[in-house]
Image: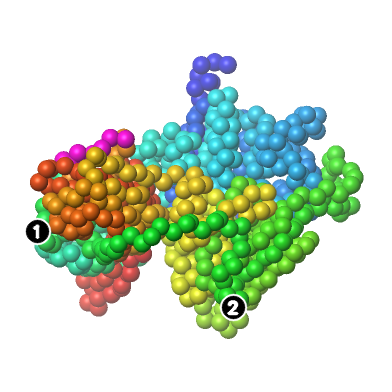
């Protein structure tokens, strides 16, 4: 092969545009006539003017919100669809994992589906037979391969699909969200296999909403928004910009369709006050997706570090004209700091114009505290030590009968391979003989009690029995033995594709699925606007479902289910394919149902997502409950990855580990912890100080006071000198701090500080995460804006209001 040939891109997209017809009932006969011009009745540009080169040995990540065009890009590369304009060239064979389980038949066994999948990929039986065992072994499904696929969990189907798709050499591998539903062990094995494929000279295009997987797998990443590539570069940089959503960090639009003529800002705001923005914006040409963004920096500390970001779509700025734009922030938790506020207007992620103004946040006059937090603090003498309760096996003997929502006793469930329908089997090359029946024990004598109003997380490796447990509670299957007692109506969120027709529009499918979930037709029509708004996929709601990405399908399916009647919510891995904005919306909706008294059973491989949602967790292995306890205890024991520790000097002051109630919380949530303070040698000049601190590179090093001040973005004395540290004793302390407008990971630190001796006597710390992690180790602060738009270049002004997300 010549050097020119070796260096040539294996995938090349040149000025590619893909237009879908979003009219649910277009003239389908025209599409069957090769000479007939295709004219969409309701055109939607999924991709517009995309250029991309992918070379051998390169792994490129693709990120962006649901509906941005990511799946369409992969379908074009895989040859599943053709571009409307432009050219797509792929030099070699393509292995595609675009939709989980595509080509799998529910009635066929695992073995039979592998053979069907191989036929679809053009793999001859002579090449497949020697590696059948390797495929089953990699997927970890040796005991389940004789069972029909319909009895597999989502994770089991993902493992089998990945094992088959990566068993044989390819030149290009395209992957869309398949790894999001696997357990951590399987994900790492997949990453190792992908690296091996790349080492062999293949190119990989990988779509995911999991930034951790993107960072592990890809050196280069594209960000797609509204069908256009808006960012392309090193993964660390692109992911950081995406998570921070900083429009001022992207390249400016080629055509500046919006311009800020004037910009005024209220010069001073008290803590938990409102930022007020008044601007005049000129729109010179039609704008497809007008956006208004605000970011804040602290010029005296680091003018390049953005601390606050708010992005909003403002459709009222679509048409040419001159507008008055006024914004009012939600309550804002800064204090004692000067801020620079940048206002950006643009089309999608591309800024057209940016202007900045300064303001002063007031407060108590302290020089170092710029996060407004007022913690509730209490202390009391340590009671006599109590023996910790023994771990359960799922049984809650303390529950009163009327407090039980779900009770399972000695439940066993086995799946059998059975006989595949003869007509189906006859069509499968080399189908396995009927043979004997092979049992797969999914649940083995399982006992479990779930309390009304409880949010129970269910964790464990793929194949542990998690999905089977939810199916039993939902009544979708029955046990071989034992008792399943479900005492309230159930809302199953197990498979968003069930009950949906690919050629019906989103609205039509909402009506069908709503009826299947028991929503009264009249109630469904009354809730229709609310369901459509919750799904938040724009005009695509009137599009046939076969044009949806997996994320868009998840949005619609969840939007219907969360509005369905019922008191027990069953959620199985269905947030794995959603973007971060949708996840937040979904989790808030689940929490709202729980606060109203509903019960939640939540299955996920994401430990932080479990902790954000649930108060109690059970861990299954081989169909049995092997651990049961509070989410914080079980998450730590199960390798949740949360760092914590205690640094004690030889001062006679000892702090126990911080027992934080919830270490992964949503933006705006509360941090609550308890700990024990033991005073052996009194320190009359010492105080207890609570701080939030950026995560250090080396946790083994005790931080100095000067470093503490630099790295802390909140410091407050919670127990003054002369308090509990001044007398010998043992005390229990509890602290609750509310409404954190922070996004990122940091350490919550409680320290005994002696100002007279200028030293830290002891400290205890626990890592927490609010919202999404931030790549530079420092948090950002999040607030929403409500926007009012008034057209001022017409005799009759046009007004519109936009409420921030």
| Residue span colored magenta | 700-707
Is 274 a magenta residue? no
Q: Secondary structure at mark 2?
A: helix
Residue 680 in view here = yes
Q: Name the residue at 19% across, 67% down.
A: 273
**Magenta stretch mostly in which secondary structure?**
loop
In the visual, does 541 lie left or right of 343?
A: right
According to the picture, the residue beneath numbered tag 2 turns out to be 402
Is 258 drawn above or below residue 237 in the view shown?
A: below
Asked if marks 2 and 1 touch (Cβ < 8 Å), the reply is: no
Nearest to the observer: residue 658 or residue 119 = 658
Q: Quadrant of the N terminus?
A: top right
Q: Name the residue at 43% across, 35% down.
A: 220
Circle number at residue 365: 1
Measuring from the top left, give residue 421's x and y in whole percent: 86, 54
Nearest to the observer: residue 761 or residue 666 = 761
Q: How far apart are the two marked residues, 2 and 1, measured between alpha carbons?
A: 54 Å
Q: Name the residue at 59% across, 50% down.
A: 460
Q: Secondary structure at mark 1?
A: loop
Local crowd at mark 1 within 10 Å, few (<14), some, or many (≥20)? few
Residue 715 in view here = no
Q: Name the residue at 21% across, 47% down.
A: 681
Q: How is the image coloured?
A: rainbow
Measuring from the top left, give residue 356's x and y in whole percent: 17, 54
Measuring from the top left, give residue 595's x and y in whole percent: 46, 72
In the visual, does 766 lie left or right of 279?
A: right
Local crowd at mark 2 within 10 Å, few (<14), some, or many (≥20)? few
Nearest to the observer: residue 481 or residue 570 = 481
């Amino acid at each position: 092969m010549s050097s020119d040939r070796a260096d040539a891109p294996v995938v090349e997209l040149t000025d590619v545009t893909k237009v879908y017809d979003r009219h649910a009932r277009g003239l389908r006969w025209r599409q069957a006539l090769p000479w007939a011009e295709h004219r969409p009745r309701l055109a939607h540009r999924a991709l517009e003017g995309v250029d991309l080169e992918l070379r051998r040995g390169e792994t490129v990540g693709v990120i962006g919100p649901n509906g941005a065009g990511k799946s369409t890009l992969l379908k074009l590369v895989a040859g599943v669809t053709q571009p409307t304009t432009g050219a797509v060239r792929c030099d070699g064979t393509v292995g595609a994992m675009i939709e989980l389980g595509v080509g799998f038949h529910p009635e066929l066994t695992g073995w039979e589906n592998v053979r069907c999948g191989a036929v679809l990929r053009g793999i001859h039986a002579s090449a497949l037979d020697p590696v059948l065992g390797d495929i089953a072994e990699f997927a970890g499904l040796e005991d389940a391969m004789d069972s029909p696929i319909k009895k597999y969990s989502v994770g089991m189907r993902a493992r089998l699909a990945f094992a088959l798709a990566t068993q044989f050499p390819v030149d290009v591998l395209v992957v869309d969200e398949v790894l999001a539903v696997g357990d951590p062990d399987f994900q790492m094995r997949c990453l190792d296999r992908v690296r091996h494929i790349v080492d062999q000279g293949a190119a990989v295009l990988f779509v995911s909403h999991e930034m951790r997987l993107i960072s592990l797998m890809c050196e280069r990443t594209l960000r797609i928004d509204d069908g256009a590539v808006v960012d392309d570069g090193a993964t660390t940089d692109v992911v950081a910009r995406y998570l921070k959503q900083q429009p001022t960090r992207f390249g400016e639009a080629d055509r500046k369709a919006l311009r800020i003529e004037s910009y005024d800002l209220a010069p001073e705001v008290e803590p938990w006050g409102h930022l007020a923005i008044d601007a005049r914006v000129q729109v010179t040409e039609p704008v497809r997706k007008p956006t208004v963004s605000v970011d804040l920096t602290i010029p005296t500390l680091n003018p390049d570090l953005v601390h606050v970001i708010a992005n909003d779509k403002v459709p009222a700025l679509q048409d040419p004209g001159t507008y008055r734009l006024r914004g009012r922030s939600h309550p804002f938790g800064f204090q004692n700091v000067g801020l620079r506020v940048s206002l950006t207007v643009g089309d999608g992620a591309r800024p057209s114009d940016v202007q900045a103004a300064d303001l002063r946040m007031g407060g108590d006059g302290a020089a170092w505290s710029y996060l407004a937090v007022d913690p509730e603090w209490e202390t009391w003498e340590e009671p006599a030590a109590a023996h910790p309760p023994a771990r359960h096996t799922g049984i809650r003997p303390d529950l009163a009968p009327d407090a039980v929502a779900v009770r399972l006793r000695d439940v066993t469930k086995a799946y059998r391979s059975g006989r595949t329908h003869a007509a189906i089997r006859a069509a499968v090359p080399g189908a396995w003989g009927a043979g004997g029946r092979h049992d797969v024990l999914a649940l083995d004598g399982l006992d479990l009690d779930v309390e009304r109003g409880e949010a129970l997380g269910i964790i464990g490796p793929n194949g542990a029995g998690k999905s089977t447990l939810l199916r039993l509670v939902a009544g979708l299957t029955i046990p071989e033995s034992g008792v399943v007692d479900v005492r309230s109506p159930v809302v199953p969120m197990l498979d968003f594709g069930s009950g949906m027709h690919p050629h019906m529009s989103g609205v039509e499918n909402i009506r069908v699925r709503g009826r299947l979930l028991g929503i009264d037709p009249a109630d469904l029509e009354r809730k229709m606007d609310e369901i459509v708004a919750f799904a938040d996929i724009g005009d695509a709601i009137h599009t046939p479902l076969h044009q949806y990405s997996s994320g868009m399908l998840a949005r619609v399916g969840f939007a219907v289910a969360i509005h369905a009647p019922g008191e027990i919510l069953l959620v199985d891995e269905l947030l794995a394919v959603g973007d971060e904005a949708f996840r937040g919306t979904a989790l808030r909706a689940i929490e709202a149902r729980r606060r109203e008294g509903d019960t939640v059973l939540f299955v996920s491989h994401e430990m932080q997502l479990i902790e954000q949602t649930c108060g109690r967790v059970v861990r299954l292995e081989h169909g049995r409950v092997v651990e049961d306890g509070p989410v914080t205890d079980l998450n730590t024991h199960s390798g949740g990855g949360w760092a914590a520790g205690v640094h004690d000097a030889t001062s006679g002051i000892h702090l126990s580990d911080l027992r934080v109630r919830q270490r992964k919380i949503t933006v705006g949530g509360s941090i609550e912890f308890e700990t024990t303070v033991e005073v052996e040698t009194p320190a009359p000049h010492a105080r207890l100080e609570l701080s939030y601190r950026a995560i250090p590179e080396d946790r083994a090093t005790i931080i100095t006071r000067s470093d503490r001040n630099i790295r802390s973005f909140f410091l407050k004395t919670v127990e003054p000198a002369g308090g509990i540290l001044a007398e010998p004793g043992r005390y229990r302390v509890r602290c609750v701090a509310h409404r954190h407008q922070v996004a990122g990971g940091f350490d919550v630190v409680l320290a005994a500080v002696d100002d007279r001796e200028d030293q830290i006597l002891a400290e205890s710390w626990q890592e927490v995460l609010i919202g999404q992690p931030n790549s530079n180790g420092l948090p950002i602060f999040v607030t929403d804006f409500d926007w009012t738009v008034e057209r001022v270049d017409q005799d009759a002004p046009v007004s519109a209001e936009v409420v921030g997300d």
